[in-house]
Amino acid sequence: MVDQVEKIYSCIDLFAGAGGFSLAAAQSGFSVRLAIENDKHASRTLSDNIGKFQSEPCRVLNEDILCLDPQALASEIFQGPDECDLVLGGPPCQGFSTHRIKDAGVGDERNKLINTYFEFVAAFKPKAFLMENVPGMLWDRHKEYLEEFYEAGKEAGYEVRAPEVLDARDFGVPQRRKRVFILGIRKDQIRDGLNWPPAPTHVNPKYTEDANELLPWNDCSSAFSPAGSSDPNNVHMNHSAELVRAFASTPHNGGSRKDSNRLLPCHENHDGHKDVYGRIDPASPAPTMTTACINPSKGRFVHPTENHGITLRQAARIQTFPDNVVFQGGLIAAGKQIGNAVPITLGVALLKHLRNELEFMGIGEFESKEIRKRVAAE
């Protein structure tokens, strides 16, 4: 008989998208047992790729989460001694993302999906849950939804920690990207001294000397190394001849629309939107990869030296997806999946730390079938 059986902790991923959180979990000692995603292209991407990161099967449901029965799924996925250790997910954030317009997004039905998320938490009763969203969810105009979420957590027996706004650059992601993470811990798992969130591993290079051996932020230059000719995601938008000429006159490595002398009617009365049609500077962290990250008209998404927008593969690399992850659905659909995802490197930093801190123990931990077979044989 072996002296010790390695444990594989279990999790589920809600509003899973293309699987940024799921793939990070699989690299952090978790087995993703269930993933739910309504978008058919993102669901296919996750289904096609999760097996590259874990040997255990993952049930991927391409369904509207509002039409699912959380209790029935919990009973089906976790039978006998199996227990859910962690629930992940980032409810769609468009209602929280709307900005500049007073009261925009207030009452948006999509905001209520954070409560649907918690219905699954209540049904699966994980030892912990970790929710990701945009900083806009913390704006005062949305406080009623956040208050409902915290109240639901308390009633279900969870200690819900204060929201943490984390910058992906501080954890090695070559991209400036701030997101909110909310951790909930089941009360029977709480112990003194829980250290959350993890300490940053990287810092602004300007302060490296005073940062106690932290690494400087990563630049995004590696994203622009050559991709394989057979890579289906090594594609970019086709641009008009006028745009190609504008890009050609834009200085390399960080040049902006204004540098190209391109003036549109919407630019005549103000000098805003300076990043639109701008080139990415490979010597610095990239701008935030949005759902329109392959479209230069939506931000600083022009290749550093070539006269076109960045490719899907380059955007995925900036999001720290490995090159063996292939995104389905075509240019626009894949760009949306990439922009919505939790960067893999950030997810791994959070989930490895969380697993160590919570010290998941004892009851119903999920063991891989391979390990079970080996133990039985011995």
Image: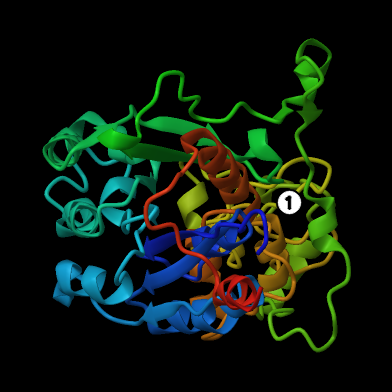
Q: Amino acid at mark 1?
A: Ile
Location of residue 73 in the rendering, given as x and y in whole percent from the top left corner: 23, 73
Location of residue 197 in the rendering, given as x and y in whole percent from the top left corner: 50, 30
Furthest-bottom residue in this view: 230
Image: 290 above or below 37: above
Residue visible at 61% across and 67% down in the picture: 294
Tag 1: Cα neighbours inside 10 Å, few (<14), some, or many (≥20)?
Answer: many
Furthest-right residue in this view: 226
User: In the rendered view of the protein, which quadrant contains the N terminus?
Assistant: bottom right
User: In the rendered view of the protein, which quadrant contains the C terminus?
Assistant: bottom right
Way the structure is coloured: rainbow
Q: Is residue 57 visible?
A: yes
Query: Seen in the image, is 227 located left or right of residue 315?
Result: right
Location of residue 183 in the rendering, given as x and y in whole percent from the top left corner: 37, 38
| Mark 1 secondary-structure assignment | loop
Residue visible at 21% across and 48% down in the picture: 105
Query: Seen in the image, is 93 located left or right of residue 157?
Result: right
Query: Seen in the image, is 54 located left or right of residue 230?
Result: left
**Front residue of this view, candidates 277 and 44:** 44
* Total numbered labels placed on residues in the image: 1
Q: Is residue 292 visible?
A: no
**Front residue of this view, candidates 315 and 310:** 315
Name the residue that disc number 1 marks. Answer: 280
Query: Seen in the image, is 301 located left or right of residue 122?
Result: right
Location of residue 117 in the rendering, given as x and y in whole percent from the top left corner: 24, 56
Residue visible at 36% across and 73% down in the picture: 37
Image: 171 above or below 362: above
Image: 371 above or below 280: below
